[in-house]
């Protein structure tokens, strides 16, 4: 298989490494509009993370790549969210399989409608969104536990300061050099940490969504205007839910709390390093389960899923574009009435 990755930043390199670990993948082409980004990918990011360059990978400028007649088994879009729409549009006929890193797009009706139209008008195109926490063994285990239980309450929180982002993007002095500093471009806590909202929608039936209350805070820098935190109480069908996402908390807190008639469950992501922990209290005894993994595994789960979808080895719709669109629509609804620039 030959896979193209658009975007030579942190996520693009994570996916490149993950794909090179799979025997089905024979070649990975990383493209970027910036030559410096391609050089940095090979000589800085990849080497520091993985020790040595992998010869399965080739680097190309995106504009030059688009001029060729190359066709790919799959294309991963790991560029900033504001460019997801154009990258899909420009590459639509270079593959039938696309994986777009989260968030799917910027929180703008024009961009959301674009992906709705692509989904509707190009039935042969299979598009997935990179909400990879759905694929973690801990999440899979939690979903299995809840399969036959009615959820009374669910809280998902992703509270993480920007230190991790800057460590992964060591060429940046602050988030002001990235899309993260502007909510309208898909940055801010609401979009960047939207794993929380997405997991909430994954666990709880949500044919109807009602926003009961919301609380948020934006910074005061007009040129880099973004939400520092965003939380809300929601009613998903008949279930009361809560989410909390921020750029402030240190050390990080990423967790899910679920209450049913029979038990209370807490899933803690990155409980110890990259390992996850699930605690189950059934009101008689407490059980604990540890799920060991590394940061590399997070993207290997995603890469394996994508390759299996390309090979038609799984019928799972867990990352289908509908899932990413549902989260973007909810984000847009939460931001409705809030001036972003």
Image (tube, helix red, strand yellow):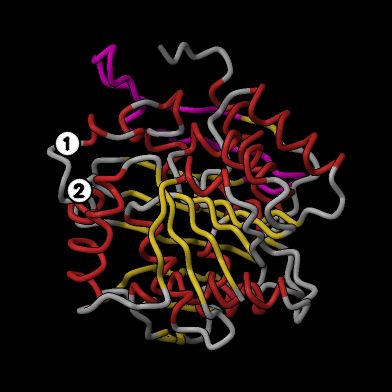
User: Tag 2's secondary structure?
Assistant: helix
Q: Main secondary structure of the magenta part?
A: strand
Q: Residue at x 45, y 36 (%)?
A: 190
Residue 46 visible, this orientation:
yes
Region in magenta: 212-240
Indicate the quadrant containing the N terminus: top left, top right, bottom left or bottom right: bottom right
- Closer to the chain start, of discs 2 and 1, is 2
Q: Residue at x 22, y 54 (%)?
A: 40
Q: Foreground residue, 24 or 203?
A: 24
Q: Residue at x 56, y 66 (%)?
A: 3
Find out whether residue 238 is within the magenta segment.
yes
To which residue does mark 2 refer? Answer: 166
Q: Foreground residue, 306 or 25?
A: 25
To which residue does mark 1 refer? Answer: 174
* Disc 1 crowd, CA 10 A, few/some/many (<14, 14-19, 20+): some
Residue 196 visible, this orientation:
no
Q: Foreground residue, 103 or 149?
A: 103
Using the image, tell me which numbered label, if any, was put on residue 310.
none
Q: Position of residue 232 (x, y in %)?
A: 51, 35
User: Tag 1's secondary structure?
Assistant: loop
- For marks 2 and 1, give the CA distance: 7 Å
Indicate the quadrant containing the C terminus: top left, top right, bottom left or bottom right: top left
* Disc 2 crowd, CA 10 A, few/some/many (<14, 14-19, 20+): some
Residue 18 quadrant: bottom left
Q: Position of residue 151 (x, y in %)?
A: 68, 61
The vertical placement of 162 against 19, above or below, is above
Q: Position of residue 109 (x, y in %)?
A: 66, 22
* Residue contact between numbered discs 2 and 1, judged by CB atoms under 8 Å: yes
């Amino acid at each position: 298989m030959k896979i193209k990755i658009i975007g030579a930043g942190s996520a693009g390199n994570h996916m490149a490494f993950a794909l090179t670990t799979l025997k089905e993948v024979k070649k990975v082409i990383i493209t970027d509009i910036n030559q410096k980004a391609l050089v940095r990918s090979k000589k800085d990011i990849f080497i520091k993370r993985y020790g040595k360059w992998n010869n399965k990978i080739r680097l190309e400028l995106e504009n030059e790549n688009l001029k060729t007649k190359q066709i790919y088994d799959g294309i991963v879009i790991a560029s900033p969210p504001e460019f997801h729409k154009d990258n899909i549009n420009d590459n639509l006929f270079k593959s039938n399989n696309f994986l777009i890193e989260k968030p799917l797009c910027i929180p703008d009706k024009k961009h959301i409608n674009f992906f709705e139209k692509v989904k509707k008008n190009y039935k042969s195109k299979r598009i997935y969104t990179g909400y990879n926490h759905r694929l973690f063994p801990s999440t899979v285990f939690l979903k299995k536990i809840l399969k036959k239980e009615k959820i009374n309450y669910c809280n998902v929180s992703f509270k993480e300061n920007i230190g991790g982002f800057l460590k992964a993007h060591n060429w940046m002095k602050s988030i002001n050099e990235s899309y993260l500093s502007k909510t309208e471009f898909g940055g801010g806590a609401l979009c960047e940490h939207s794993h929380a909202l997405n997991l909430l929608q994954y666990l709880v039936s949500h044919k109807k969504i009602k926003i009961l209350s919301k609380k948020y805070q934006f910074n005061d820098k007009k040129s880099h205007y973004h939400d520092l935190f965003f939380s809300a109480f929601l009613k998903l069908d008949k279930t009361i839910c809560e989410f909390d996402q921020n750029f402030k908390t240190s050390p990080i807190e990423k967790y899910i709390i679920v209450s049913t008639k029979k038990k209370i469950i807490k899933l803690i992501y990155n409980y110890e390093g990259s390992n996850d922990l699930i605690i189950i209290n059934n009101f008689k005894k407490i059980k604990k389960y540890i799920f060991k993994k590394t940061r590399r595994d997070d993207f290997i789960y995603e890469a394996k899923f994508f390759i299996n979808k390309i090979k038609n080895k799984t019928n799972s719709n867990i990352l289908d574009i509908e899932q990413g669109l549902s989260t973007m629509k909810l984000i847009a609804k939460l931001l409705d009435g809030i001036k972003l620039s």
